[in-house]
Image (cartoon, rainbow, N blue to C red):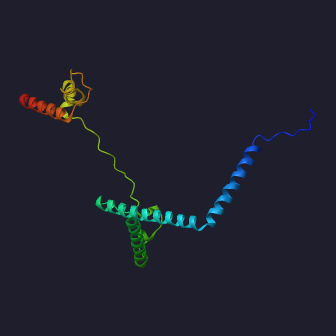
Amino acid sequence: MAQSGFSMLDPLQFWRDALSNWEGSANSLANKEMSSEESVRAMQAVMSVAMALQQALGKANGVLLKELNLPSRSDIVEIGARLQRIEEMLEQLSHRLGDPAVSAPGPARGAMPPRTRKPAPVVAPASALASPAAAREASPATTPASRGRGGSGTASPAAVAKAAAVRQRSTRRKA
C-alpha cells in the first residue's frame, strides 16, 4: 500500500513535549530560587531543624532501649568488633600452639562423629504377652479414659497412670 504524504503521528510525542517543557520551567524556577539569599537561609533553617529532630529522636530511642534492657545499634557493632578481636586472638594462639584440629579451616573444625547407636526397641510388658485381654488393657488407646465416652482414642497421661495402677492392683490380687 502506498504511503500518503502525511507521516504517522507519534501518540506519545505530545506527552514528551509537555514533560520536557515542565522540566525546563521547574529547573529555571529552582535556579532562580536557589540564587536568592532568602531561600538559602530558609533551607538552612529547615535542615537544622531536621538535624535537631533526628538527634532528639536518636537520644529518645537510646533511652527507650536502655529502659527495655535492649542493646542499641552501637552496642551491637561494639560487640561484633570485640568478638572479631577475640576470634583473631584465638586463631593466633592456635597457630602458635600448632594445634591442627583448631587451626584447620572448614566445617571439620567442630564436626561431630556420625551417630551409630539406634534407639532401643519398645518391648511389650510380660502381661501383654500372656493374654489378649491384658494386651488391650496395656494399650493407651483403650484406657478407661477413652473407652465408650466418645473420646478421640488417645488418653491423657493421668488416665494412663490411673489405668496402670488399676492393672497393677488387679495383678497383685490374682497372685
Quadrant position of the N terminus in the picture: top right
Where residue 89 appears, as percent x and y from the top left, is 40, 75
In this view, the residue farthest toward the bottom is 96
Where residue 9 appears, as percent x and y from the top left, is 82, 40
Q: Which of 66 and 76 is in front in this view?
A: 66
From the viewer's perspective, tell me whether residue 12 is left or right of residue 39: right
From the viewer's perspective, tell me whether residue 127 is left or right of residue 26: left
Above or below — where is 132 with respect to 98? above
Q: In which quarter of the image is residue 98?
A: bottom left
Quadrant position of the C terminus in the picture: top left
Q: Nearer the viewer, residue 117 or 92?
A: 92
Question: What residue appears at the point 66 percent right and 58 percent down from the top-left corner?
Answer: 29
Q: In which quarter of the image is residue 156?
A: top left
Q: Quadrant of residue 26?
A: bottom right
Where residue 171 appears, as percent x and y from the top left, is 10, 30
Number of numbered discs present? 0
Question: What residue appears at the point 57 percent right and 66 percent down from the top-left corner?
Answer: 38
Q: Nearer the viewer, residue 62 or 155?
A: 62
Where residue 7 appears, as percent x and y from the top left, is 87, 40
Above or below — where is 170 with respect to 35? above
In this view, the residue farthest toward the right is 2
Above or below — where is 155 with respect to 46? above
Q: Nearer the viewer, residue 152 or 18?
A: 18
From the viewer's perspective, tell me whether residue 7 is left or right of residue 21: right
